[in-house]
Image (tube, rainbow, N blue to C red):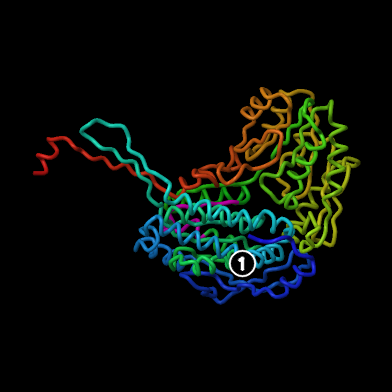
């Protein structure tokens, strides 16, 4: 794992020396797009061109899928002994560790994420995820169903085949690991489409996987836009399932692609408008405020599980909001390569404009602090008061550092407001009453509910949502393996009559 944080100057020096990948990664090696086309990948801070990346299209998707299918069908990975597959992924995790600092700086430069978050969260958790699923490979048991003495009923899992993995731009490496970890552990061959804004670390990781001994064709990276790569992957007749993380609007498209092609399985992890409920009996409001701020502003609010709605009881609102503002002042905006920076650049100029557009809809006088746009790339963490749950700021996923405050007068009202959303990904509830905490956690319609804290669980707990936040499977934990496998029943007749019939 990585050592202590470096200085800003040291990170800048590493950034200047990076060798950035340019081509897609298919069948164990880098390849330009068949068309020869490229697109520019930009530094979110400056808008300057970092480099060019292969602009793939349907022809490249066809080629990658054919190589993935070839690898799956000849069994070079799926038929490998489970302990041998585990060994490959363990070597892969070790190579990620050895190259962690390079990946950290590349991730920050490409996405605008702070080097602090990349060093302390994204890269360590990426490595941990690969190791976790690797260790699970030879510890996942199948089942024997109860049956009569004349029968043996086996329930076994089999790798689903060739899978398409479509990644978001907010956690490029971590979301890659969340998907390839269980997919490769299950024995699948995969074709990955990284977000067009953040392709670089995904390409580098594929190269490290090959170095670790992953067979050719098992992990393929096809770079390019949604229409050129995502749609052909979603519609491909030889792709068995797609796991998608991103916006709800794009997730709907993958359902259409499936219905109009081969009815491939679709797993969706999409948006959230996540509530943080703070009741009048919550203890230590200073600690509560630190959780609220972290949940709202971590990763610039570019987080599907961000707690963007603070639903607070009127009796403690003023005291809590004062402390929230105090903690928010510690979240300074600045150069992502400075380890002192807590809020980096938004991923692109287009996304910056979108977030600023939402802030313009805040009623006059409602912005308690922040919200200032800086240099066309940064947005100060904003706290907006007196928001109604029917307002756009409380209904739509902003995906930026914006916290909306909604005042309630009872536990029942708080839960009702929390559930009054199209989404259901994550939620938090703060209360000193244990019965109320458990009741609230059960009543809130969300895939993850934390009590007296903000978080998403850990690698051992499933992550996914209710309603328009997604369905079809879960990331993380042993449950993540389910989406990449099929269940098969093998029924053996052991009766004497059956034996005589064979004779």
Decide: is 423 above or below 208.
above
| Front residue of 469 and 26 | 26
Which quadrant holds the C terminus?
top left
Region in magenta: 232-245
Q: Is residue 177 left or right of residue 135?
A: right
| Front residue of 138 and 350 | 138
Q: Does the magenta portion include 103?
A: no
Q: Does the magenta portion include 243?
A: yes
Please give the name of the residue rendered at 49% of the width and 61% of the height, measured from the top-left corner: 191
Q: Is residue 346 left or right of residue 327?
A: left
| Front residue of 470 and 184 | 184
Residue 390: horizontal and vertical position, in percent? Answer: 75, 35
Q: Is residue 386 visible?
A: yes
| Quadrant hosting residue 349 | bottom right
Residue 442: horizontal and vertical position, in percent? Answer: 61, 28
Please give the name of the residue rendered at 11% of the width and 43% of the height, measured from the top-left corner: 502
| Quadrant hosting residue 107 | bottom right
Q: Is residue 364 left or right of residue 434?
A: right
Q: Secondary structure at mark 1?
A: loop
Which quadrant holds the N terminus?
bottom right
Q: Is residue 257 visible?
A: no
Residue 330: horizontal and vertical position, in percent? Answer: 84, 49
Q: What residue is disc 1 on?
A: 99
């Amino acid at each position: 794992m990585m050592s202590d944080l470096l200085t800003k100057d040291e990170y800048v020096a590493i950034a200047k020396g990076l060798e950035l990948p340019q081509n897609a990664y298919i069948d164990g090696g880098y390849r330009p797009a068949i068309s020869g086309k490229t697109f520019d990948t930009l530094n979110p801070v400056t808008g300057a061109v970092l480099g060019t990346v292969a602009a793939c299209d349907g022809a490249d998707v066809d080629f990658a899928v054919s190589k993935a299918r070839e690898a799956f069908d000849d069994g070079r990975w799926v038929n490998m002994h489970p302990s041998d597959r585990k060994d490959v992924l363990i070597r892969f995790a070790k190579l990620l560790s050895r190259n962690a600092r390079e990946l950290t700086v590349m991730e920050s430069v490409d996405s605008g994420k702070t080097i602090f978050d990349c060093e302390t969260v994204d890269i360590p958790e990426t490595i941990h995820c690969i190791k976790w699923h690797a260790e699970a490979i030879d510890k996942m048991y199948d089942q024997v169903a109860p049956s009569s003495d004349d029968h043996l009923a086996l329930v076994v899992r089999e790798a689903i085949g060739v899978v398409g993995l479509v990644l978001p731009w907010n956690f490029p490496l971590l979301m890659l690991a969340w998907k390839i970890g269980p997919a490769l552990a299950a024995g699948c061959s995969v074709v990955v489409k990284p977000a067009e804004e953040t392709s670089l670390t995904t390409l580098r990781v594929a190269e490290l996987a090959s170095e670790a001994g992953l067979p050719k064709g098992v992990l393929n990276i096809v770079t390019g836009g949604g229409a050129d790569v995502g749609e052909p992957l979603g519609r491909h007749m030889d792709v068995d399932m797609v796991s998608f993380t991103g916006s709800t609007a794009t997730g709907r498209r993958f359902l259409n692609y499936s219905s109009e092609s081969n009815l491939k399985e679709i797993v969706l992890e999409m948006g959230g408008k996540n509530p943080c409920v703070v009741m009048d009996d919550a203890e230590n409001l200073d600690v509560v405020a630190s959780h609220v701020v972290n949940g709202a502003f971590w990763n610039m609010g570019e987080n599907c599980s961000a707690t963007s709605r603070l639903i607070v009881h009127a009796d403690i609102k003023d005291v809590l909001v004062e402390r929230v503002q105090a903690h928010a002042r510690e979240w300074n905006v600045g150069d992502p390569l400075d380890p002192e920076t807590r809020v980096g650049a938004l991923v692109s100029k287009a996304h910056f404009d979108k977030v600023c557009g939402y802030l313009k809809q805040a009623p006059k006088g409602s912005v308690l602090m922040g919200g200032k746009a800086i240099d066309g790339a940064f947005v100060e963490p904003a706290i907006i008061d007196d928001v109604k749950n029917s307002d756009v700021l409380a209904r739509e996923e902003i995906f930026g550092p914006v916290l909306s405050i909604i005042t309630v007068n009872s536990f029942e009202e708080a839960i009702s407001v929390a559930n009054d959303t199209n989404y259901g990904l994550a939620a938090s509830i703060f209360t000193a009453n244990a019965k109320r905490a458990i009741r609230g956690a059960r009543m809130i319609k969300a895939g993850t509910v934390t009590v007296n804290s903000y978080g998403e669980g850990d690698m051992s707990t499933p992550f996914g949502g209710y309603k328009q936040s997604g369905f079809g499977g879960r990331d993380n934990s042993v449950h993540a393996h389910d989406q990449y496998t099929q269940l098969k029943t093998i029924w053996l007749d052991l009766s004497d009559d059956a034996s005589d019939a064979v004779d």
